[in-house]
Amino acid sequence: MSTCRELRVEYLRAPIGVGTRHPRFSWIVDHRQEGYELEVATAGGTVWATGVVESAQISLVAYGGEELASNTAYTWRVRSRTPGGWTPWASAAFDTALLDPEDWTAEWVEPAQQDAVVERWSILDWIRGLGPDTPPEERLRPPQLLRQRFTVREGLVRARLYATARGVYSAFLNGRRADDQVLAPGSDAYEHRISVQAYDATDALAAGENVLGIALADGWWAGRLGLTGSSAQFGTRTAAIWQLHLDYGDGAREVVASGEDARSAVGPWVYADLFVGEHYDSRRVPIGWDRPGFDDADWMPVTTPGHDRGVLRPFTGEPIRRVRELPALTVTPTPEGAVVDFGQVIAGRVRLRLRAASPGQRIRIEHTETLAVDGTWFDNIAGINKEQTDVYVAAGDDVVEWEPEFTFHGFRYARVSGLSAPLDAADIVAVVIASDLEQTGSFATSDVRLDRLHQNAVWSQRGNFLSVPTDCPQRERAGWTGDLQAFVGAASNNAQVVPFLARWLDNLRADQLPDGRIPIFSPRSPFDAEAAATTQGIGAIVASAGWSDAIATVPWVLYERFGDRRVLEDNEEALRRWIEYQRTAAAAELPSSLEAEELTPERRRRQALLYNAGLHFGDWLTPSTMEGKPVHEAIMIAPALTGELVAPMFQAQTLTIAARIARVLDRDDADDLAARANQVRAAFAAEYIDDRGDLPVRLQGVYVLALAFDMVPPERRPAAAARLVELVRARGDRLDTGFLSTPHLLDVLCDHGYPDVARTLLWQSEMPSWLYEVDRGATTFWETWDAIAPDGSIRPMSMNHYAPGSVDDWLYRRVAGIRPTSPGYRTAVIEPAVDIGVGRVSAHVTTPYGRLAVAWSRAGGAISLEVDVPHGVSAELRLGGDTVPLPAGTSVHERPSFAPASPR
């Protein structure tokens, strides 16, 4: 008989450090479930039992017993009733974290250190190419080492280490790494919350003397961040805090807490910075520093400055890890060093094997995402404090492997200099680091270019889902809200993103301003707030339409794809505060275009409904506004042209999402929110859409958003859609959409009767287009469509920006045809675009109920489909005007060809 499998707590298998007293449990079944029983227990017995529940629910079953205790080991088991009887019990385990600030007795400890050098740079400095005039070793400080000795007695049965830092750290127990994660605790809104990691330390400890070691660097706390590369944006001094909880077989419990008994010393690093890079001198390693028996008499005492423990929060989701390794494809000697091509743009670093390096030999590793058109080295990462260069100084070992500890880079190519012999390709690998999200989707076709397009989205997601969802892994590494709201649908197909994005949303809510504004990126530092308050123009933008509206879009998409009601509950208040800010701003301000006009009472009433004043990013990086101009001159053209129109469109869409959320959560004002959305739409149409369906700005993106968000009255939609097609044709069947409108472009065309135009845009290979990038060797999505021009010249732009990769969601939903019709795929449709121009497509998504997959092909006069539907999903196949219910399991379907295609 089948059994329950894939047992998970808060989306994770057997997690330790679960950060809630009311976790949710999920499992998968290979049968029709009619009911279930679930029990949770400790070593002392059962703490909650559901009894028999008559339900098909297998996802996110909420714990309903007495609140779970901190730092406690639990087991749980579940069984499912099938039409033929009960399955056997299936069991799993989880541990809770330290759940309350009161659980902490440890003190923050600061190693002996100099304050970080505070470097402040503005956007204007970045545009002008200004930067520091001193080498990194003169303005960066070394990471510190911390060690604490403690005694363990006989009979230890369980040990859990809870640790975090103001900075980034690596933890060691008796010379062993605490686990395989890197760059802990990651990026956080440190003023409000700092994530605490939980480690299973049981096997690393022994009776007698033990040592806990912490290596501590500046990281996101005090290192260089953002577009300007300014330093010390959260603080100037690093610190760490930890508690080691020891449980013995006789029932005794002990806590080893950080405090004044810890000692500190400078480590073997000359410096380590996330942006600048890492300089490591292996001659300075204090051998055995993290093991018993080491003499630390000359180490420095620590201080306990009394930092707030109330900001400590259990880490949620998957940590940053080394997720894969890429071998060198080619090694090309040049006078400046050996240039290594790893074949893929990534976020990560290089691991190098050195043979017979002499003492003091200095090896230098530089990184870049692209080479120049003639194959020479090209640094495409323009900006301050972004050297992306690592340095290793050898101690003279015969053979040694080295990988940086406290930095990462965005790169495809590395240049290695300082070697005493030619570099062997076997002695270097690229180590990909990312938040270790489970990959849950696949998409493949008979066309290699479409396959590469999909893989570019996967790699861009991997490179930018690193602690927080960033815009790019080399230049800014900021959690831009607009980028994520554009890409969240695609991201949800490719990976299990809920815990990762829920943690980021926690940070976003923490960063929300008192007046309700949602910032344009999160985490947001005190320096970011100061810079915005003291500058003008683009640098002064704090909240922006489309960006700030991520507080609505992201939770709603997660609910649609995963059925997670809690993500709506957690973000509802912040969403409503943002809506109220928009309402207040709309009533108080007029757009600059109307400030000198004498408005009629009716127009003033309409304008008071529209959030359309102030500076917004608009349809950012619209291609036609960028052409033929330097980046710093072109970037504000699209905001000036489209901001006033885009802002009320997103206002209406956010109100609509808020109304949907209110209905899901059984709020009383759902209808009122929907009515407010309709009022905004009516006012917008009266102000900006003429009788022919035309808008005042003739750009594709404006029409796309107006149609996507139902801003155009029904009787004028055909004309507006026809105008959009005119604009596409006028551009030579090429797209001209920016960050906000690109995700909706192909859907709008399909939904308004122009699937042929959508198909033409998909296959377009002239710039700007998706396949233009593929044809020029892109392995990730570029920030701008012309980052590499047709003549091969390169603009100083990011080569790894996932926002334009939102088309990947369309490939899943429209080309493969897999899409949910109710939250969490409880109901779904398979409706493939068999006339898209390929001969074969296969794809799958992992729903809360299991794998939902389709493989279709067309040959001669027939279309063949194979569909896999998990138990718990009610799905139907739509093809050629027919609708066929799909059974659970695998089914095969044959249909005559009803549309022409040119299979590739």
Image (spheres, grey):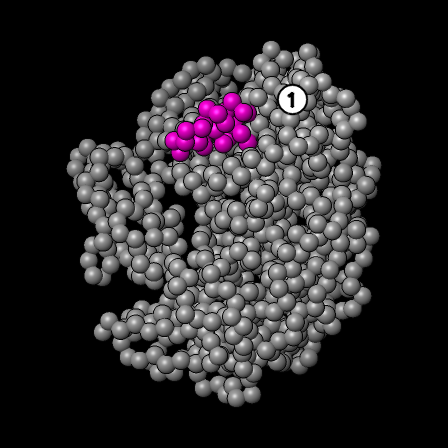
Circle 1 packing at 10 Å, graded few (<14), some (14-19), many (20+), is few
* 660 falls in the magenta region: yes
Residue 453 shows up from this direction: no
The C terminus: image quadrant? top right
Is most of the magenta stretch helix, strand or loop?
A: helix
Q: Is residue 266 left or right of residue 500?
A: right
Nearer to me, 875 or 138: 138
Vertical order, 236 against 471 (above or below): below
Q: Is residue 759 left or right of residue 27?
A: right
The N terminus: image quadrant? top left
Residue 509 shows up from this direction: yes
Residue that appears at 76% across and 69% down: 135
Nearer to me, 545 or 78: 545
Q: Position of residue 262 (x, y in %)?
A: 49, 79
Disc 1 residue type (three-letter): Arg
Residue that appears at 32% across and 44% down: 62
**Which segment is the magenta one?**
654-677
For the view shown, which residue lies furthest in the front direction? 601
For the view shown, which residue lies furthest in the left direction? 85
Residue that appears at 24% across and 71% down: 251
Q: Position of residue 207 (x, y in %)?
A: 33, 80
Nearer to me, 34 or 712: 712
Residue that appears at 28% across and 79% down: 154
Vertical order, 314 against 898 (above or below): below
Q: How many numbered marks have been drawn onto this rendered protein structure?
A: 1
* 286 falls in the magenta region: no
The residue wearing badge 1 is 605
In terms of image quadrants, where is residue 440?
A: top left
In terms of image quadrants, where is residue 688?
A: top right
Q: Position of residue 324 (x, y in %)?
A: 52, 55
**Disc 1 secondary structure class:** helix
